Image (cartoon, rainbow, N blue to C red):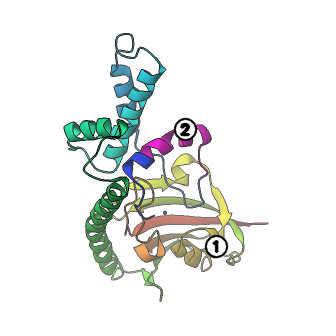
């Protein structure tokens, strides 16, 4: 389960704050970033010959910013940046010399660049999701509601149905339409409690249709999931989502 209006530099500077303060996960959970990103960071850090290069804290800060900056670029799908222009521009800016862009122009260009990138990627994801749901609704046992939510019943419970203001305990397993797992309380072995109206729209609608004890498979269009926003590194903008949801109880 945001508009890409922040600049890359801002995202790098925010890393320091994030490291010291952390952040709270909303009920719309997403798994941690893939381990490969962490390995890249650790490898880069170990590769720096600190005894010869990092002579003081400012050197260490420079190296740390470099690692964080490159990881930030990589996480946003940028791997072929012109480092020569980047370095010269940083040096000129730090010296107060004239640069190609003013601060306002740079922010505007970066915002427009990533907005276009998101739209291009989102268009592909959106089409794939719509095609998946169009084919899926033809399958035996799949029900489509007025909102576009699709579900199939794995097991029908005989308990009460929760209301929007109830708190429930569930087990779930979430994937993209291609089967990629992005979050799973089942895999963690720990059910999750949350308000029915505190999650994505597709869940809120489905939970109120499910008697306690039920296990359903939900097929959620992007408009009932995270919409035009990406939700962490594993759920692109415009993603249709698939969940197996077991409603364990209404929490009193």
Callout 1: SS = helix
Q: Is residue 84 above or below residue 122?
A: above
In the rendering, which numbered label is found on residue 19?
2
Q: Is residue 203 above or below residue 62?
A: below
Residue nearest the observer in this picture, 217 or 18: 18
Q: Secondary structure of the magenta portion, mostly?
A: helix
Q: In which quarter of the image is residue 55?
A: top left
**Point 45% across, 23% down: residue:** 58
**x and y percentages locating residue 11 in the rendered image:** 44, 48
Q: In which quarter of the image is residue 39?
A: top left
Q: Quadrant of the C terminus?
A: bottom right
Count the labels in the image.
Answer: 2
Nearer mark to the viewer, of 2 and 1: 2
Left or right of 138: which side holds 219? right
Q: Disc 1 marks which residue?
A: 197
Q: Does the magenta stretch include residue 170?
A: no
Residue nearest the observer in this picture, 157 or 145: 145
Residue nearest the observer in this picture, 63 or 129: 63
Left or right of 100: which side holds 148? right
């Amino acid at each position: 389960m945001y508009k890409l209006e922040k600049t890359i530099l801002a995202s790098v500077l925010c890393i320091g704050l994030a490291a010291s303060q952390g952040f709270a996960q909303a009920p719309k959970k997403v798994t941690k970033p893939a381990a490969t990103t962490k390995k890249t960071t650790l490898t880069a850090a170990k590769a720096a010959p600190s005894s010869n290069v990092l002579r003081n804290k400012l050197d260490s800060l420079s190296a740390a910013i470099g690692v964080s900056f490159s990881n930030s670029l990589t996480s946003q799908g940028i791997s072929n940046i012109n480092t020569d222009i980047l370095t010269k521009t940083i040096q000129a800016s730090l010296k107060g010399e004239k640069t190609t862009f003013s601060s306002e122009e740079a922010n505007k260009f970066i915002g427009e660049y990533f907005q276009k990138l998101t739209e291009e990627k989102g268009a592909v994801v959106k089409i794939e999701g719509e095609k998946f749901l169009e084919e899926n609704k033809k399958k035996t046992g799949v029900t489509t509601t007025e909102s576009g939510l699709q579900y199939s019943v794995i097991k029908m419970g005989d308990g009460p149905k929760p209301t929007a203001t109830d708190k429930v305990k569930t087990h779930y397993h979430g994937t993209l339409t291609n089967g990629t797992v992005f979050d799973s309380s089942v895999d963690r072995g720990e059910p999750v409690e949350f308000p029915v109206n505190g999650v994505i729209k597709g869940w809120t609608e489905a939970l109120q249709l499910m008697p306690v004890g039920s296990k359903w498979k939900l097929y959620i269009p992007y408009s009932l999931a995270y919409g035009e926003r990406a939700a962490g590194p594993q759920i692109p903008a415009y993603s249709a989502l698939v969940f197996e949801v077991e409603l364990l109880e209404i929490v009193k």
